[in-house]
Image (cartoon, grey):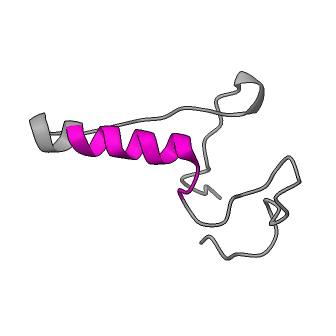
Amino acid sequence: MWSVPGGASTNPCDDDFKGKAQGDAPETVALSSFLKSIKSAQGLKLYIDYHSYSQLFMTRKLATFC
């Protein structure tokens, strides 16, 4: 879904620049490499990363009730 229009900016000078490609940020590359090494060494069942603006816990709506 990286090529969906709207949302984050494609301009590298903007504050909400999404990057050139999915997962290209150095932090993402480092975390991915670390988790892959843990998975190959001892197995990794679950990794959860909670983050949001202003320390709010936001989830998507999972079900619709009429």
- The location of residue 15, given as percent across then percent down, is 86, 46
- The location of residue 47, given as percent across then percent down, is 35, 37
The foreground one among 61 and 10 is: 10
The foreground one among 11 and 7 is: 11
The quarter of the rendered structure image containing the C terminus is: bottom right
Say which residue appears at 72% left-offset and 58% top-offset. 18
Residue at the farthest top position: 55
* Quarter holding residue 55: top right
Q: In the image, which residues are magenta?
A: 23-37
- The location of residue 38, given as percent across then percent down, is 21, 36
Say which residue appears at 60% left-offset and 41% top-offset. 59
Q: Is residue 30 visible?
A: yes
Q: Is residue 10 above or below residue 29?
A: below
> As drawn, is 64 to the left or to the right of 9?
left
Q: Is residue 52 above or below residue 20?
A: above
> As drawn, is 47 to the left or to the right of 54?
left
Q: Is residue 14 above or below residue 58?
A: below
- The location of residue 48, given as percent across then percent down, is 42, 35
> Is 9 part of what is drawn in magenta?
no
The quarter of the rendered structure image containing the N terminus is: bottom right
Say which residue appears at 48% left-offset and 34% top-offset. 49
* Quarter holding residue 7: bottom right
